[in-house]
Amino acid sequence: MNSVVLLSFVIGYFVLLLVVAYYTSRNSNNDSFFIGNKSSNWMLVAFGMIGTSLSGVTFVSVPGTVSTVAFSYFQVVIGYLIGYMVIAFVLLPLYYRLNLTSIYNYLHHRFGMISYKTGALFFIISRTLGATARLYLVINVLQIFILRDLNISFGVATLVILIMIILYTFEGGVKTIVYTDTLQTTFMLLGLIICIIYIMTNMGYSVGSTLSEMGSNNLTHIFNTDVNSSGFFVKNILGGMFITIAMTGLDQEMMQKNISVRRLWDSQKNMITFSVIMVVVNFLFLFLGGILYIYGKANNIIVPGDDLFPTIALQYMPAAISIIFIIGLISALFPSADGALTALTSSFCIDILGLKRKKLSEQASKKTRLMVHFSFAIIFFLAVMLFKWLDNKSIIDIILKVAGFTYGPLLGLFSFGILTTRKVIDKYALYVCLLAPLIILGIDFVNNIEWWERQLKLQSVWIENVKSSSSGIFGNFKIGYELLIYNGILTFIGLWLISKPQPIPAEVETILEDGTR
């Protein structure tokens, strides 16, 4: 497929986003940017959140995992579904009762200013790393399969895409993103379904015969029953559950859209609807991965997992399918990046700079907000270039691993506040939240030294010594996605040690009664 033609579709798609942004951002103010004036339609939020949650990682990386671990990722998806129910019926009622703009204000009410800013800081770190990892994956695909032929470097492509995102988010914020995410989710799902149907038809398969062929290639296996394996089904289901609670329920980007809905029940309907659709869509991506494996095997296509879908779509399919793939891919790219940029701007302005408390004029607040927005775009650029330097071929594994370290303190802070009535010594909260992930990092480094060796390209006698000692400490047991749980538990214990069994002030206890029952 001609690279110029594909690039023209990318540009045309972006122009469409600008048109939508223009109409949705008219008469916008700071409340529009931060919480959409609390007037978002719950159905649009639910549908648009699919694109934000899936991103280019799901579009490219999840199908690529099927060739090595079959459908075992679905174990994590089962955990996601349980986690979404916890968010709908535990966290959302708390956020609505407090009438929050930033969900980390809960920590201010419950513990104090240091805990509040600590929670916001860990969100900023977590979302920056997660969003830029997703951004890297999609830009890398575009650069390899389109832009390289046009002599456009990876750095230039990254810069241009970030400028595009700034242009349609800087004014309307959440108010605009609710609509653009809906549009982008539609294109992404259409791309997924059309690609599945075309490849199946091309190979002469029905749904039943495709599943049968996948089964004969041992691709449909879901549950891992090896207790020592990092992919053991209990570890993955629990890991998926707590990853969802942390990466969605304790994440300002995701909750910012939910709390932009006027009523709690509508927000809960959004979460329930979204979670069911997410399970179905993730299964379709795994199904696509199985089809791609069979097609690749038949045509002797041997490429790394994350390159399988783009290679087949852009080099072995007709022009129409190549175009549909590119539109689906960039539709997966923008929701994860634009929402993150908006949420990070909101969190930094409200939680770190305290714009709401300073009572600035609308114009002064807007000026500060724009400066923060542009600053995060620069940080995004630098982080994406770092991922390019690491050049990892399994980004979904990286994202879930990073989440285990950075979202763990958030999980510990919120669970301690909700499950206990103890009062922490606020000034020590930051130290606990820094120490817990560092300890877990050390444990995971020893336990999964081979993984760290691959990611960081480590080779030395010292690494070999760590390998030999780790087998003596852990045996065959490997830590998986439940890493987040260990981190959260360690943070919880640390908070308990710096807390006192004194009652919460009556006025705060009244406000927080939903979260401490």
Image (cartoon, helix red, strand yellow):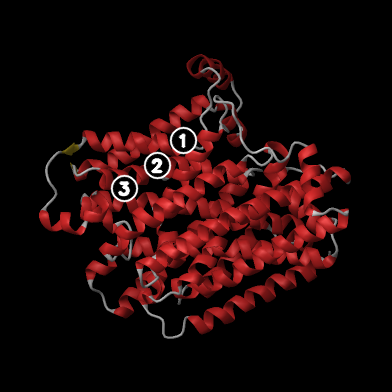
The answer to the question of whether label 2 and label 1 lie on touching residues, with beta carbons closer than 8 A, is yes
Q: Quadrant of the N terminus?
A: bottom right
- Give the residue drawn at x 49%, y 64%: 339
Q: How much space separates mark 2 and mark 1, taking CA atoms? A: 8 Å
Which residue lies under the disc numbered 2?
A: 408
Asked whether the residues under the numbered discs 3 and 2 touch, taking CB atoms below 8 Å apart as contact, a structural biologist would say: no
User: Considering the numbered disc 3 on the image, is that residue within a helix, a strand or a loop?
Assistant: helix
Q: Position of residue 411 (x, y in %)?
A: 36, 45
SS under mark 1 = helix
Real-space Cα separation, disc 1 to disc 3, in angstroms: 17 Å
Towards the viewer: 181 or 433? 181
Q: Can you see residue 326?
A: yes
Residue 300, x across and y down, in percent? 87, 43
User: Exactly how many numbered labels are in the figure?
Assistant: 3
Q: Amino acid at mark 2?
A: Gly
* Sooner in the amino-acid sequence: mark 1 or mark 3: 3
The residue at the point 23 percent across, 43 percent down is 420
Q: Position of residue 167 (x, y in %)?
A: 53, 74
Three-letter amino acid code of the residue under disc 3: Phe
- Residue at (64% x, 62% y) in the render: 156
Q: Quadrant of residue 453?
A: top right
**Tag of residue 414:** 3
Percent position (x, y) of residue 222? 64, 39
Q: Which mark is residue 483?
A: 1
Q: Between residues 407 and 84, which one lies in front from this camera angle?
A: 84
Q: Residues within 10 Å of mark 1 (few under 14, many from 20)?
A: many
Residue 152 makes an appearance in the image:
no
- Give the distance between the C-alpha atoms of the residues marked 3 and 2, in whole angstroms: 10 Å
Which of the 4 image quarters holds residue 315?
Answer: bottom right
Up the image or down, 417 lies above or below 257; here it is above
